[in-house]
Amino acid sequence: QVELVESGGGLVQPGGSLTLSCSTSRFTRAYYAIGWFRQAPGKEQEGVGCIRDSDARTYYADSVKGRFTVSRDNAKNTVFLRMSGLKPEDTAVYYCAAVLSGEFWSCTKGGYDYWGQGTQVTVSS
C-alpha cells in the first residue's frame, strides 16, 4: 500500500517562502515519479513540479519556474517542494502524488496513481 502525507502548508505573506514535505510509505526510489500538484478554487488542477526517479529529471510549470524547487531526501523517504517569491495566485491546496511504474513521464494528474490528502497554502498580506 502506498501512503503519501503532505505537511508544511500555512499562511505566508507575498514574497515569502514555504517548504512543503511529502512523507512516503515506501522508499522514495521505489517510485517511477513523484509530483506536486495544486488546485485553487474554480481552477483546474495544475502540475507544479515533478521529479522522475531514474535520472532525477525535474519539470516545472511555467508559472513557478525559478521560484519552486522539487527535491528528495531518500534517507527520510521524503520529497520536498521549496517555494519562494510566493504570490497570491499561488494560493491553493497542494497535493503530493506518486506513480510506481510508467513508460512516459509526465507532470499531469493522469500520470499519477497515489495521492496525499493535500495541504492548504494561502499567500496573503
Image (spheres, rainbow, N blue to C red):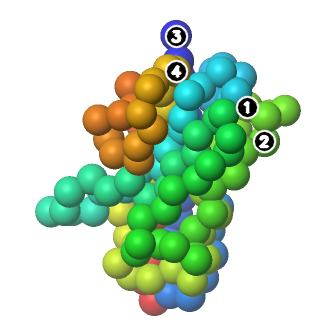
For disc 4, the marked residue is 100
For disc 1, the marked residue is 77
State yes or no: discs 1 and 2 in contact (Cβ < 8 Å).
yes
C-alpha separation, residue under disc 4 versus residue under disc 1? 14 Å
Q: In the rendered structure, which amino acid carries the disc numbered 4?
A: Leu
Residue at image point 71% right, 23% down: 27
Residue extending farthest top: 1
Dot placed on the residue nearer the N-terminal end, 3 or 1: 3
Crowd band around label 3 with a 10 angstrom C-alpha radius: few (<14), some (14–19), many (20+): few
Q: Nearer the viewer, residue 35 or 43?
A: 35
Q: In the rendered structure, which amino acid carries the disc numbered 3?
A: Gln
Disc ID at residue 98:
none
User: 108 above or below 116?
Assistant: below
Judge depth for marks 4 and 3 and give the one in front. Answer: 4
Residue 125, how many percent across, how many down? 45, 89
For disc 2, the marked residue is 73
Dot placed on the residue nearer the N-terminal end, 4 or 1: 1
C-alpha separation, residue under disc 3 versus residue under disc 2? 20 Å
Q: Is residue 101 visible?
A: yes
For disc 3, the marked residue is 1
Residue 69, how many percent across, how many down? 63, 63
C-alpha separation, residue under disc 1 versus residue under disc 2? 6 Å
Q: In the rendered structure, which amino acid carries the disc numbered 2?
A: Asp
Residue extending farthest right: 75
Residue 79, how many percent across, how many down? 66, 43
Q: Nearer the viewer, residue 22 or 109?
A: 109
Q: In the rendered structure, which amino acid carries the disc numbered 1?
A: Asn
Q: Secondary structure at mark 4?
A: loop
C-alpha separation, residue under disc 2 versus residue under disc 4? 17 Å
Dot placed on the residue nearer the N-terminal end, 3 or 2: 3
Relative to residue 98, is residue 39 drawn left or right? left
Residue 112 falls in image quadrant: top left
